[in-house]
Amino acid sequence: MGTGAFRHAVTVKAPANVPAEPPFWYCAIEPAGNQVGGDGMATYLLRGRYHPGITLETQIDFEGRTLQVQAVTDVDERHVSMLLIAVEVRGRV
């Protein structure tokens, strides 16, 4: 996936909504399948260049939605790309 595929600019927030550095991350966002249980969360895959501020406690704001990171994977060993699994938090932000 080339750089041009990372067309979604999202806001990255560390725990307690402290802004991460850098505060924005460009990524590709796609649904990861069905809803997760009946608790109002949908799962997404986010792919983009490596971002040092993203952890399992990171929240990502995108077009009025809040996503909570559930898994972080370095796509390669050089820390160039990342793959995140995140769930959309609804009514429990």
Image: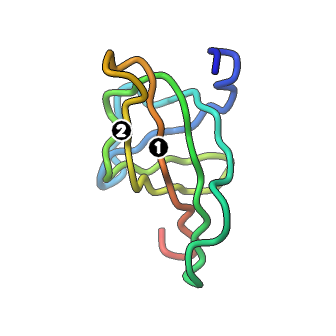
Q: Which residue is mark 2?
A: 54
Type of amino acid under label 1? Leu
Q: Earlier in the sequence, mark 2 or mark 1?
A: 2
Q: Nearer the viewer, residue 42 or 65?
A: 42
Q: Which residue is mark 1?
A: 84
Total tally of numbered discs in the picture:
2
Type of amino acid under label 2? Ile
Q: Is residue 45 above or below residue 39?
A: above
Q: Nearer the viewer, residue 51 or 13?
A: 51
C-alpha span from label 2 to label 1: 9 Å
User: Within the image, what quadrant is residue 39 found in?
Assistant: bottom right
Task: Tell me the mark number nearer the camera, choosing from 2 and 1.
Answer: 1
Query: Dot 2, how many residues are within 10 Å of its Cα: few (below 14), some (14-19), or many (20+)?
Result: many
Secondary structure at numbered mark 2:
loop
For the N terminus, the image quarter is top right
* Residue at point 68%, 45% (across, down): 30
* Residue at point 61%, 65% (across, down): 42
Tell me: 32 left or right of 69: right
Q: Is residue 78 above or below residue 43?
A: above
Secondary structure at numbered mark 1:
strand
Q: Position of residue 32 (x, y in %)?
A: 63, 55
Q: Nearer the viewer, residue 69 or 22?
A: 69
Query: Dot 1, how many residues are within 10 Å of its Cα: few (below 14), some (14-19), or many (20+)?
Result: many
Q: Is residue 69 above or below residue 90?
A: above
Q: Position of residue 23 (x, y in %)?
A: 44, 31
User: Within the image, what quadrant is residue 6 found in?
Assistant: top right
Tell me: 73 left or right of 29: left
User: Within the image, what quadrant is residue 18 found in?
Assistant: top left
Q: Position of residue 24 (x, y in %)?
A: 50, 29
- Residue located farthest toward the front when viewing the structure as drawn: 76
- Given contact means CB atoms under 8 Å apart, are the residues at marks 2 and 1 in contact? yes
